[in-house]
Amino acid sequence: MLEYALKGSKRYWTWVCFLLVLIGIGFIAYLNQFQVGLGITGMSRDVSWGFYIGQFTFLVGVAASAVTVVLPYYFHNWKKYGRIAVIGEFLAIPAVLMCMLFIFVDLGQPMRVMNVLLHPTPNSVMFFDMVVLSGYLILNLLCGWVVLGSERKSAPPPTWIKPFLYIAICWAPSIHIVTAFLYQGLPGRHYWLTAIMAAKFLSSAFASGPALLVLLCMIIRKFTKFDPGKEAIQSLAKTSAYFLIATILFYVFEVFTAFYSSIPGHMAPITYLFSGLDGFTKLVPVMKVCAVLVAIGTIILVTPPLRKWEVTLAIGALATFLGMWLEKGLSLVVGGFIPNPFERVFEYWPTLQEVLIALGVWSLGFFILTILYKIATTVKEKAVFDKYGQKQIIE
């Protein structure tokens, strides 16, 4: 099926070349970091996790969100997701690869990656994070490729793949739970020291992931003949809405606990993020934009007429995705380091080179996603009808 990726329109190749240019820019920036070290980043002794770890944390959620599609389809036979089950599984593959790459660039020296393999430490959460991420990548690659291959032959998936499908569904939440344990297991960071950190991670992941899938389904329908199905898109939007509300509630619970109990360590990071602390306000505009985006996403996704109109649905899904990205991809990580154990504020802001490296990693992820979706949509266009007898292509 790989040959399908080698055939495409002028628009397809223009997009691929554009991504390759961005990957090249990111790689050049990384070469500079490789020579100079992490000194080119905005990180310091006081803020040792920054933009890279924020992207890793966010993308683990995107990868885990594939379960919102495959679980209803394989466990509950929700037929409307039959067309997009592979689309969800294929989204998880580049998301996990990007997670690994962000860890790679955050380590500074590539050879340090080998320490995890050469000196395994089962008492470290990071070791288990590597295990679950690697396992999830293999499972999604195997399941997605085999199921798509069966669709290509107009045959049901082989029986032997079913156990792997069920394992992948059960495995998905674990990758984000283990990542949450990396944070909530640090007693010196009050912003992360909460028992519902894993629940917050899962809820925000299941809000942003389906929102991204809604956008991807719309893009696929616009630029290919394959139709993911209006009901499937609407179901994804509802899933995103429910978990977005849960995410907001979890955040309100945290704010209530911190301020009603007047715990200084818990109040300080929230105060810093929303109104500034000791005159430092770098992340205040970010959080205000985040709050506005989340409000827009919530209003649109929970209001049926706005959700059903595809123009506003696209705006709502984009606002949800960007809002969750700002919350988890930047403010969550930085907020945990402020103030430091000496009650002082050392602010962090990503440097241009840091952003370029991150842009290169994101572009590589979208490059892989483009290739996978090109193969998947070509197979589905050829199938014409799905296994339930419903037409898959747009006339």
Image: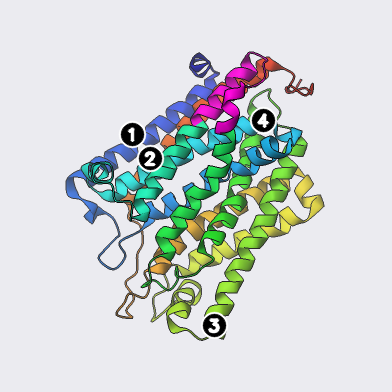
User: Could you tell me how far apart the alpha carbons at marks 1 and 2 are, in whole angstroms?
Assistant: 7 Å
Q: Amino acid at mark 4?
A: Lys
Q: Earlier in the sequence, mark 4 or mark 1?
A: 1
- The residue wearing badge 2 is 360
Q: Identify the residue at image location x=65%, y=35%.
A: 217
Q: Is residue 184 left or right of residue 205?
A: left
Magenta region includes residue 145 = yes
Q: Main secondary structure of the magenta part?
A: helix
- The residue wearing badge 1 is 24
Q: Secondary structure at mark 3?
A: helix
Where residue 156 sits, quadrant-wise, is top right
Q: Are marks 1 and 2 in contact (CB under 8 Å)?
A: yes
- Residue 181 visible here: yes
Few, some or many residues within 10 Å of mark 2 (<14, 14–19, 20+): many
- The residue wearing badge 4 is 222
Where residue 17 sits, quadrant-wise, is top left
Q: Earlier in the sequence, mark 1 or mark 3?
A: 1
Q: Earlier in the sequence, mark 2 or mark 4?
A: 4
Name the image quarter holding the C terminus. top right
User: Could you tell me how far apart the alpha carbons at marks 2 and 3 are, in whole angstroms?
Assistant: 40 Å
Few, some or many residues within 10 Å of mark 4 (<14, 14–19, 20+): few
User: Could you tell me how far apart the alpha carbons at marks 4 and 1 are, in whole angstroms?
Assistant: 28 Å
> What is the span of residues highlighted in magenta in the rendered image?
141-164
User: Could you tell me how far apart the alpha carbons at marks 2 and 4 are, in whole angstroms?
Assistant: 26 Å
